[in-house]
Amino acid sequence: MDDSRQAAVSLAVSTVIFALAQSGDSGDRGGSGDGGPSALRLPLVRRIREPHEGLWALPGGPIAQAESLAGAAGRNLQETTGLNPTYLEQLYAFGDVDRSPVERVVSIVYWALVRTEEAELATEGENVRWFAADDLPQLAFDHNAIVEYALWRLRTKLEYSRIAHAFLGDTFTLAELREVHEAVLGRPLDPANFRRQVESSKAIIATDERLTGGRHRPPRLYRYNTSVELTDNGPLARIERN
Amino acid sequence: MDDSRQAAVSLAVSTVIFALAQSGDSGDRGGSGDGGPSALRLPLVRRIREPHEGLWALPGGPIAQAESLAGAAGRNLQETTGLNPTYLEQLYAFGDVDRSPVERVVSIVYWALVRTEEAELATEGENVRWFAADDLPQLAFDHNAIVEYALWRLRTKLEYSRIAHAFLGDTFTLAELREVHEAVLGRPLDPANFRRQVESSKAIIATDERLTGGRHRPPRLYRYNTSVELTDNGPLARIERN
DNA sequence: CCAAAAGTGTTGAATTTACACCCATGA
DNA sequence: TCATGGGTGTAAATTCAACACTTTTGG
């Protein structure tokens, strides 16, 4: 926290952006019907200069003078995908001396969740592409390891907080919510027990509406309970939002 | 991760250092007997220039060109207290635009645990002093909030991993380990249930020795089981140690 | 023998898990 | 009416919490 000579080390922000995509989707409502199991996907950008020119990398860049760290993360998410995150959290600061071959870079990495429905509209192009999270090519710098860590955080956080709904729209069925959990955790969950757990957590509120058009008994739609803190980050929530 | 103009934002590393001190200690063995309950303490340094000259602050400073982030944290721990940490983990990167009144500073903050016995030898002086963690004066910058967050992390981490022994020596009794938990969590724990929990976790190994000299039945001494990962940081452990 | 901490046993409550079964709808 | 997912009930298994009780030492 001293002032003094800096310059030697440069600072950047990167973001790991997760969305859930149906394996063979077609734009209709996300989960309730079939259409193949969902899978985690994330957007990467192609490096257009050295080092690692041509390799895929996490979206990121330097932070502006008057911009918060989370703001920078949200901005480069917006710039590369055109989307707004429904969840954004700092992951870790990576600062190994040799993580970039040309200069000393410390990257403060965020991870974000975006809604499935919106992710389908996301920009894609020559230099931006979505990849399956569990089947990535070799990435630039230490980005493979960073994604692996982000995945681990997402999975563990899912178990003790209620962030899964960040993938969904305003209203959703319990089956849709359960499918998100199943996709992220990679294992099937008992529908009956899942229902009881999430209901007892008070994180969601039943609405009067039901989702019609399915082939069977129409399931009830639920809404998030915004009066409940969805993630437990302790005092950090207060600190960051002040 | 682009190269480019930086300079606008400077980077620093700070460390929240926790030790456990007997309320009225006298250098004899830490816990088993009485001597008052233990309390969390941490060292602060006095600012000797603006901004916030005269206020107490977390130890910290800029990172050297060829130094890892954790290395920088360990170094300034060593420089201010003369101690080596038994546990060191990244806490968070704080980067609010206005957290320093004079320039834009992003601080990557670590938190550390040091052994009780060693902490008693720690350097203290005009500009370095130890404070009770739950009764701090007004600190420089956003450091009060940072300490609050570090305390929360320590407490929650204690419940799902086995870091408490980082406060203790090579061997210790279950009562000593339990007293660490009680001091950090701030509530009494059932000795019988605590014993079973920690024994079933396989985190410690019974030795043949017992601690004699107490006034009652001599308790068995235990040792850490180094073959068990003490903290679950997921893939991060591998990433950082590579 | 007495006091007090070390260590063991037991019981009831709470939570988790597995799975049987009824309900409601479209076709 | 049938197939199927929505939704409820329930009993066994596991974990958790409280506390009685036995053991071992110093004095």
Image (cartoon, coloured by chain):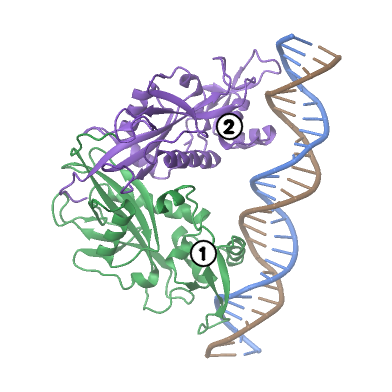
Chain colours: A purple, B green, C blue, D brown
Question: In this figure, which residue is indicated by the disc labeled 2?
Answer: A183
**Chain for numbered disc 2:** A
Amino acid tagged 2: Ala
Can you tell which quarter of the image residue C12 is in?
A: bottom right
Question: In this figure, which residue is indicated by the disc labeled 1?
Answer: B226
Along the line of sight, the residue nearer the viewer: B126 or A131: A131
Helix, strand or loop at disc 2? helix
Helix, strand or loop at disc 1? loop
Image: A150 above or below A168: below
Q: List x then y, in percent, for residue A95.
A: 32, 46
Position of A140 with respect to B101 (left or right) is right
Q: List x then y, in percent, for residue B142.
A: 27, 47
Can you tell which quarter of the image residue A34 is in?
A: top right
Q: List x then y, in percent, for residue A46.
A: 37, 27
Residue closest to the far left: B49
Along the line of sight, the residue nearer the viewer: A3 or A204: A3
Residue at (28, 35) in percent of width and height: A68
Give the quarter of the figure containing the C terminus of chain A: top left
Number of numbered discs: 2
